[in-house]
Amino acid sequence: MVNPVWVGTLMFGRVPIGVRLYSARERRGPVLHQFQRGTADRIRYVRVNERTGEEVAPEEVVRGARTGIEDEYVVLEPEELEDILPAGSRTMQMHGFLPEGAVDPLWYASTYYVSPRGPADTEAYRLLHAALDRTRRVGAATVVLREREYPVLVQPHRGVLAASTLWWPDEVRDPDDVMPPVTGAEPGKGELELAQELVRALSVEWDPGDYEDSYGRRLTELVRAKARGSTFSHRPDRSEGGGEVGAIGEALRQSLPNRPHKRGRAPVPRRPATVRAEARGAAEGRRTKRELLRQASELEVPGRSRMSRDELEEAVGRAGAGRRR
């Protein structure tokens, strides 16, 4: 178990629910530190006074913020920062409910799992989870985390509640603020039809298992090899792409699966992991996730899009049994 990042009260109308927030994400892979070349000496960062160059003890460090004048700061004491926290900074008050998918992913910052704080909070917690799941809504609220206030969305996810912090409107940039305008002619009709055909032909269901952190894996192999005193080399696979293609329309045609090139034989597309897994499941007589999703849709199983294959199988079985009664 890990330590919670926030402990407080989630307000569902006038119903208080004691909750804890746990980080839903964790970086994996080797951690790279800094060393002085030719030695085993770590490079460390210390707090120093930039005027005297002397190290400063942690208890002597206070916060400060720049004023409108260059190189002018005001010092903020801990009790001053504590005083301006919003009232009820340990309370997450939901003030409205939005349809699922109403908030663009651009606004999402971090996501946390929400756990009931104790046995007395379980009943209200499960009630809120079921209500959001069945109505396909998410709760909009605000929360104070690590001395900052955030908008937050509370929604069912993987059988529990999750809380996702959002950026404030003035923190989200418009494209015109950070990049030059995109110019050029509109795509031609023929090329657009080919592009749409390619999108349809390569459409898949999202499964994170289809993706691999290849750089992280190779970094781990490199670290292990050097620890053994051996070497590790990597030769990038250049078998796909990289060749010169003339017109964009011809490049699109060559990209379509089961379409022959002008020369040679038709390319054989690599099957994603989900397809391979479904093939194995079919060979073993098990229903594939796609089949279970279709059955769950017919049975109107709530929350089906977020379920794993095993969860879908169980939910479809329960819903089917309920229909037969």
Image: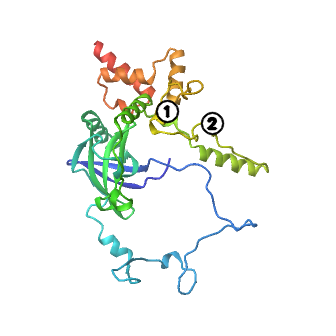
Question: Which residue does the numbered mark 2 point to in the structure image?
Answer: 239
Q: Amino acid at mark 2?
A: Ser
| Residue at the image position 72 percent from the left and 67 percent from the top | 37
Q: Position of residue 41 (x, y in %)?
A: 71, 68
Pick out the residue farthest to the right. Answer: 229
Snapshot quadrant of residue 145: bottom left
Q: Quadrant of residue 102?
A: top left
Q: Secondary structure at mark 2?
A: loop
Q: Relative to residue 61, is residue 301 drawn left or right? A: left
Q: Is residue 155 visible?
A: yes
Q: Earlier in the sequence, mark 1 or mark 2?
A: 2
Q: Is residue 31 above or below residue 51?
A: above
Q: Which residue is mark 1?
A: 255
Q: Residue at x 59, y 71 (%)?
A: 45
Task: Kindly report the distance in space between the C-alpha atoms of the residues bearing marks 1 and 2.
Answer: 14 Å
Q: State the residue lying farthest toward the top.
A: 324
Q: Quadrant of the C terminus?
A: top left
Mark 1 secondary-structure assignment: helix
> With 13 as the anchor, is 238 left or right in this view?
right
Q: What colouring method underlies this structural image?
A: rainbow
